[in-house]
Image: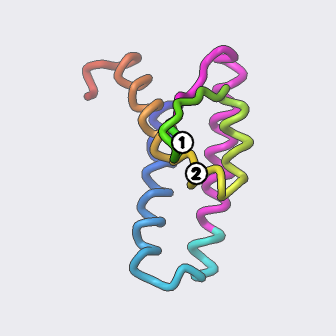
């Protein structure tokens, strides 16, 4: 599951990077980002059920560290402002990569 989350985060970041080169109103890209964030939210919810005490630590724009339960992170993925404000995709990616290394250290 962690690898799926990493792949989803990578995909979101790549589309965002490509949007920087184009008009941000590209309907297809925006629809893709919304759908992919929804998929990522489902993945986070699924893990939240099996890891109820797990949290993701984020640093907000003011430099404050905050921890959020996986289910809370899943809900934030529907709020563009929260995604940007908390740098959520990068933080989820970093968290998933750390768990991938722990579960399979030989792959990294």
Front residue of 63 and 83? 63
Residue lying furthest bottom: 23
Asked which quadrant contains residue 43, the reply is: top right
User: In the rendered image, which residue does mark 2 sit on?
Assistant: 85
Q: Residue at x 44, y 57 (%)?
A: 13
Q: Is residue 103 left or right of residue 77?
A: left
- Of residues 93 and 42, the one nearer the viewer is 93
Relative to 59, 28 lies left or right:
right
What span is in magenta?
32-58
Give the residue at x 57% y 82%: 26
In percent of width and height, residue 42 lies at: 69, 41
Find out whether residue 51 is within the magenta segment.
yes
Quarter holding residue 103: top left
Rendered location of residue 18, percent (x, y): 41, 72
Q: Quick check: is 44 in the magenta stretch?
A: yes
Residue placed most toward the observer, 17 or 87: 87
Label tally: 2
* Residue count near mark 1 (Cα–Cα under 10 Å), binned few <14, some 14–19, many ≥20: some
Q: 28 above or below 91?
A: below
Q: What residue is at 67 percent from the left and 26 percent from the top?
A: 69
The picture places residue 108, in percent across and down from the top left corner, at 26, 28
Q: Position of residue 19 (x, y in %)?
A: 46, 74
The answer to whether residue 20 is above or below residue 16 is below
Distance from the alpha carbon under mark 1 to that under mark 2: 6 Å
> Answer yes or no: do the residues labelled 1 and 2 have beta carbons within 8 Å?
yes
* In the image: residue 91, left or right of residue 98: right
- Residue 53's place in the image compared with 84, above or below, is above
Please tell me whether mark 2 sits on a helix, a strand or a loop: helix
The structure residue drawn at horizontal position 48% and vertical position 48%, both measured from the top left corner, is: 9
User: Majority secondary structure of the magenta segment?
Assistant: helix
The residue that label 1 is drawn on is 60
């Amino acid at each position: 599951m962690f690898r799926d989350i990493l792949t989803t985060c990578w995909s979101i970041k790549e589309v965002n990077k490509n949007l920087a080169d184009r008009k941000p109103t590209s309907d297809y890209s925006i629809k893709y980002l919304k759908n992919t964030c929804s998929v990522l939210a489902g993945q986070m919810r699924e893990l939240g059920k099996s890891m109820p005490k797990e949290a993701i630590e984020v640093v907000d724009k003011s430099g404050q560290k905050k921890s959020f339960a996986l289910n809370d992170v899943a809900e934030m993925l529907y709020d563009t402002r929260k995604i940007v404000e908390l740098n959520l995709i990068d933080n989820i990616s970093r968290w998933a990569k750390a768990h991938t290394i722990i579960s399979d250290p030989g792959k990294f």
